[in-house]
Amino acid sequence: LWVTTLENGAYYAPDLSIEHLAYEDSSKVKSVLATDKQIMMGTYSGMFTVLDVQTKKTVFKKKFASPVNTLFRDGRHNVWVSTEALVRYNEDFQELLRHNKLNPVLDFVEPREGGIRGYTSSSCYKFDEDGGLVQALHAEKGGFRNMLFEDSVVYISGRLGLHVFDTTH
C-alpha cells in the first residue's frame, strides 16, 4: 500500500492490504467502530449495522430516525449509539438503556475515575457505569469544540473561549 501526503511525501506500508466491504446502505457512513470480532457502522440515514469480521454478514441492524452521530464501546463492552436518542446496548445488542431527551452526543470518553462522559455542541454529560445520567453541564454561550478530563476538572474549548468545570460540586 502506498500513501501520499501533501506535505510529507509518500509512504509505503508492506504487507498491508485493504479489502473492499460491500455495504447495502447507500447512505454515507458517519461513524465506525471496530473490534476484533465486529465492524459497527452508523450512517447519515440513521442505519446502525453490525457486521461479523470473519463472515462479513450482518449480525444486527437498527434504523433510527436521525443520523448516527457516533459509536462508542465502553470498558464493559457495552456499545453506545448517539442519534435522536442515546442508546446503550450490551455485547449481544440487547437494548439496556435509552435517553430520549438529551442533545445528540458527538463524542465519548471513559475517564480513569469511572463513568462515561459525552459531549454535544453545547453540553457535557456524565453517566455512571450503568448509563444513568449523573450530571449535565451546559455552555452559556457558543458551542463546544474539544474536551479534556483531568481528575475532577473538565476543560472544554469553545468558540468563545475555555470553559472549566469542577465536577466535585
Image (cartoon, helix red, strand yellow):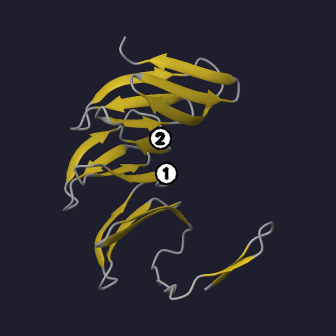
Indicate which disc, 2 or 1, sits on the residue closer to the N terminus. 1
Q: Which residue is mark 1?
A: 69
Q: Quadrant location of the C terminus?
A: top left
Q: Residue at x 43, y 45 (%)?
A: 84
Indicate the position of residue 162 as horizontal and vertical percent values.
Answer: 63, 23
Q: Give left or right: position of 121 versus 88.
A: right
Q: Residues within 10 Å of mark 2 (few under 14, many from 20)?
A: many
Q: Secondary structure at mark 1?
A: loop
Q: Quadrant location of the N terminus?
A: bottom right
Indicate the position of residue 151 as horizontal and vertical percent values.
Answer: 39, 26
Q: Is residue 166 above or below residue 111?
A: above
C-alpha distance separating marks 2 and 1: 7 Å
| Between 74 and 120, the one nearer to me in the picture | 74
Q: Secondary structure at mark 2?
A: loop
Q: Which mark is residue 9?
A: none
Q: Residue at x 19, y 62 (%)?
A: 92
Quarter of the view holding residue 135: top left
| Between 113 and 77, the one nearer to me in the picture | 113
Q: Residues within 10 Å of mark 1 (few under 14, many from 20)?
A: many
Q: Is residue 48 above or below residue 117?
A: below
Quarter of the view holding residue 109: top left
> Residue placed farthest to the top in the image?
169
Indicate the position of residue 145 as horizontal and vertical percent values.
Answer: 61, 36
Q: Is residue 60 above or below residue 125?
A: below
Q: Which mark is residue 104?
A: 2
Q: Is residue 61 above or below residue 57?
A: above
Amino acid type, label 2: Pro
| Between 28 and 2, the one nearer to me in the picture | 2
Amino acid type, label 1: Asn
Cβ atoms at labels 2 and 1 below 8 Å apart:
yes
